[in-house]
């Protein structure tokens, strides 16, 4: 309960406005700048299939942008990064495109 004088105006109630929807952005970069940017569509989540797809796009982009450099992909142990579904394609990408992978 709020104590106030009879003649003071009643308190205003705040109206909550729906905020902008959240968006997932994946960014790969090195010391020279950004290599690849990818936005995730609204309502989608990062799963193994999506992660592998993103890495394949990154490999194509790396060949074009940094053809002479050896890339090291350092990622955390989130489920899409370490799942069994991801493990085999990651090794194939590693063999064919010479990307060294390491996990935190």
Image (cartoon, rainbow, N blue to C red):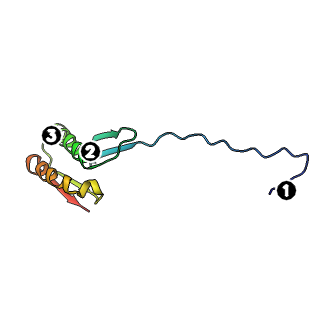
Residue wearing tag 2: 50
Question: How many tags in the picture?
Answer: 3
**Extreme-left residue of the structure:** 96
Packing grade of label 1 (10 A; few <14, some 14-19, many >=20) is few
Q: Which residue is drawn at 14% across and 41% down?
A: 67
Dot 2: element = helix
Tell me the distance, in whole angstroms, between the alpha carbons under discs 3 and 2: 20 Å
Q: Position of residue 85 (x, y in %)?
A: 19, 53
- Say whether disc 1 or disc 3 marks the residue closer to the N-terminus: 1
Q: Can you tell which quarter of the image residue 75 is in?
A: bottom left
Dot 3: element = helix
- Say whether disc 3 or disc 2 marks the residue closer to the N-terminus: 2
Q: Which residue is drawn at 56% across and 40% down?
A: 18
Q: Which of 34 and 14 is in front in this view?
A: 14
Q: Can you tell which quarter of the image residue 22 is in?
A: top left
- Which mark is drawn over residue 104? none
Q: Position of residue 1 (x, y in %)?
A: 80, 57
Residue wearing tag 3: 63
Residue wearing tag 1: 3
């Amino acid at each position: 309960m709020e104590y106030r004088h009879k003649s003071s105006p009643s308190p205003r109630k705040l109206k909550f406005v729906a905020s902008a929807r959240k968006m997932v952005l994946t960014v790969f970069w090195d010391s020279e700048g950004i290599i690849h940017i990818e936005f995730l569509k609204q309502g989608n989540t990062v799963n193994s299939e999506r992660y592998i797809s993103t890495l394949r796009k990154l490999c194509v982009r790396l060949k074009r942008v940094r053809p002479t450099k050896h890339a090291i992909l350092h990622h955390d142990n989130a489920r899409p990064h370490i799942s069994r579904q991801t493990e085999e394609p990651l090794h194939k990408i590693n063999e064919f495109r010479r990307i060294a992978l390491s996990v935190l």
